[in-house]
Structure formats: structure tokens, C-alpha cells
Image: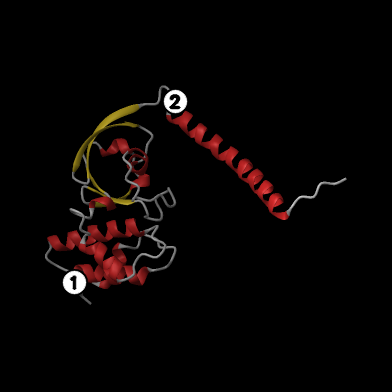
Amino acid sequence: MTKKISRRRFVEGTSAGIVAVATVPAVKAQQKAAAAATLPGVPKTTIRINVNGVDRRVEVEDRWTLVELLRDHLDLTGTKIGCDRGECGACTVLVDGTPLYSCSQLAVWMNGRSIQTVEGLAKNGKLDPLQEAFIQHDAPQCGYCTSGQLMIAKALLVSYEKKNARPTRDEVRAAMTGNLCRCSNYNHYVEAVMAAGGENA
């Protein structure tokens, strides 16, 4: 005699099996990554850097990129990894005030440098005026590229402040060309930067 199985029990049973099968490769991948991270003989260098105003002395593997150092070892996950090949701009940070793709810079190259990430924009719990402008103008959509957009915009505005000038819309567009937005929210980003920098047609 065939034992009857309820639909609920069948679904629960197959779901558990799917989760178990999907979990095995993920666990193996994590184990492999952990093993690779502790390989003996990997060259390491101790560097001194200033990150968001804090001096740090960090031992880095010579193969780490700057974005790996920031995200995986300093827990500054506001910097995103998009394409991981220097094309999308999601990982943009400021190095000595210059915007750079952190996925294309080795951490070991940062010795003696000053780095600012998106976490360094807010001061004493208060958002930077640029961040406020992004919120007011609905600039972030999915938000993935937003930290990179903020950092390139910050570099632009600081450079103009030093000249006691304001960027035009065309100058904002030109400066932000290297930062891609998959949500195509470019006009809102431009409006937000214009508002933060003071309107200048």
C-alpha cells in the first residue's frame, strides 16, 4: 500500500533538499577562499595609511587591491565592488584628494597616502551637505553606485571651492562620466551636485 504524502510535506522536503544542495558549493567556496587567504609564503608588506582621518598601520598581502583592504580587512563596506576592473566607478575613493578606482589600485601602493571613503563624508553624525543634496534630489535609486557617485562629486566640488568657483552642469556631467548608474539616474545626480555646489547654469 502506497503511503500518501501531503503537498505541504512534499514541498518542505524538496525545499530542504534544494537548500542543502545549494549550500554545499557555497561552503566549499568559502573554505577554498579561507585556505587561499592563509597560504604560506604570500608576500606581505606593512604600510602606513590615513583612512578617513585615522592613522593606521596595516600588514597587507602584496596582491590585495585597495578595495579588498577597505572592505574585507578594515570593514569599510560603503565602497562597493561593481565591475572589479576599473570601468564602472562604484569603488571610487579619494586618494590624497584625487578620485581613483580602488579596484585598480594595489593596497601596497597606498603607503603614506591619505584615503577618504564614503564613510568619511559625515562628520560627528551629521551628513555632508552633498549627501543631503543627494537625498533631497532623489539621486540614489538602487544605491549600489551611490558611494562612488558621492566621492567623484565630492572631489569635483572641493576642487571648485579651492578656486572659489562653482561648476556648471556640463562640468558636472564631464566629471561624473566615469561613474556608471545602471538605474540611469544621471539627471538626478547632476541636479544634486549642482544644488550642493550652488546653482551655476
Question: Whole-Å distance between the Cαs marked 1 and 2?
Answer: 52 Å
Q: Are marks 1 and 2 in contact (CB under 8 Å)?
A: no
Quadrant of the rendering where the N terminus is positioned: top right
- Residue at image position (37%, 40%) is 72
Secondary structure beneath label 2: loop
Residue 60 in the figure: left or right of residue 113? right
Residue 174 visible in rendering: yes
Q: Nearer the viewer, residue 196 or 84?
A: 196
Within the image, what quadrant is residue 192 found in? bottom left
**Mark 1 is on which residue type?**
Gly
Label 1: which secondary element: loop
Q: Earlier in the sequence, mark 1 or mark 2?
A: 2
Instruction: State the scheme by which the image is colored.
Output: secondary structure
Mark 1: few/some/many CA within 10 Å (<14, 14-19, 20+): some
For residue 2, above or below residue 186: above
Residue kind at label 2, given as amino acid type: Leu
Name the residue located 22 percent from the left edge and 46 percent from the top edge.
52
Q: Position of residue 185 (x, y in %)?
A: 39, 68
Which corner quadrant holds the C terminus? Answer: bottom left
- Residue at label 2? 39
Res. 71 image quadrant: top left
Name the residue at 11% across, 65% down: 164
**Residue lying farthest top?**
41
Dot 2: within a 10 Å radius of its alpha carbon, few (fewer than 14), some, or many (20 or more) residues?
A: few
Identify the residue position indicated by label 1 in the image: 198
